[in-house]
Image: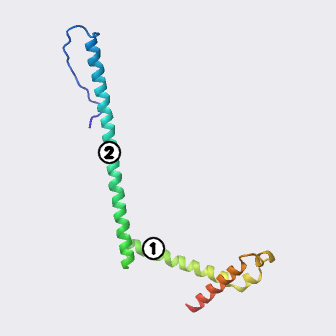
Amino acid sequence: MACDDYYTVLIIPLQNSLYSPDALHCFHWLKRRRDLERQKDVLWAGLQVVEQTQLWYQNRLKLNLQRQVSFSTGDLDGEGRWSCAMRSCMQRVNGSLGNLMSDSCVWNNLAPEESGGSDWHLRWSNATLVKSYLLSS
């Protein structure tokens, strides 16, 4: 890959002067070649970034696949232990919410507009199901 600090010395013998049509044609040709070389360098740099990104995504996919396999087989590493701790915390929170929902004081002190709502029966049946589940376990 070319860098910004390089230069090329090109000696072209011209029969006339620097301002002849041949000299101008050669100058424009060299300028075009230099621009194409810079464009090629930028494209190569972009290709390298794309390849590195592709490798990163492939590694992430492999890690996720390994994590899924270890989770499905029951192998728990440090990350699995963390997720077990998180699940335990979520179960405690769900249990507390279930106790709160099944508390008779909460349901008996509902405002009239809350007890007459269209989803009141659904909430009541959900609370009784949660309460019966918690009592059975």
Q: Quadrant of residue 133?
A: bottom right
Rendering coords of residue 134 (x, y %)? 59, 88
Side of 77 where 20 appears, left or right: left
Residue situated in front as seen by the camera: 4 or 25: 25
- Badge 1 amino acid: Ser
Q: Which mark is residue 49?
A: none
Q: Say above or below: 53 vs 46.
A: below
The residue singled out by tag 1 in the image is: 83
**Residue at 34% of width from left, 43% of height from top?**
46
- Badge 2 amino acid: Leu
Rendering coords of residue 116 (x, y %)? 78, 78
Specify whether residue 4 is in view: no
Residue situated in front as seen by the camera: 129 or 3: 129
Query: Which quadrant of the figure contains the C terminus?
Result: bottom right
**Residue at 39% of width from left, 75% of height from top?**
71
Residue situated in front as seen by the camera: 67 or 81: 67
Q: Say above or below: 133 vs 97.
A: below
Side of 83 where 105 appears, left or right: right
* Disc nearer the start of the sequence (2/1): 2
**Residue at 32% of width from left, 29% of height from top?**
35
Rendering coords of residue 63 (x, y %)? 35, 65
Instruction: Judge depth for marks 2 and 1 and give the one in front.
Output: 2
Side of 21 where 104 appears, left or right: right
Rendering coords of residue 58 (x, y %)? 34, 59
Specify whether residue 121 is in view: yes
The residue singled out by tag 2 in the image is: 47
Q: Quadrant of residue 6?
A: top left
Q: Say above or below: 72 vs 53.
A: below
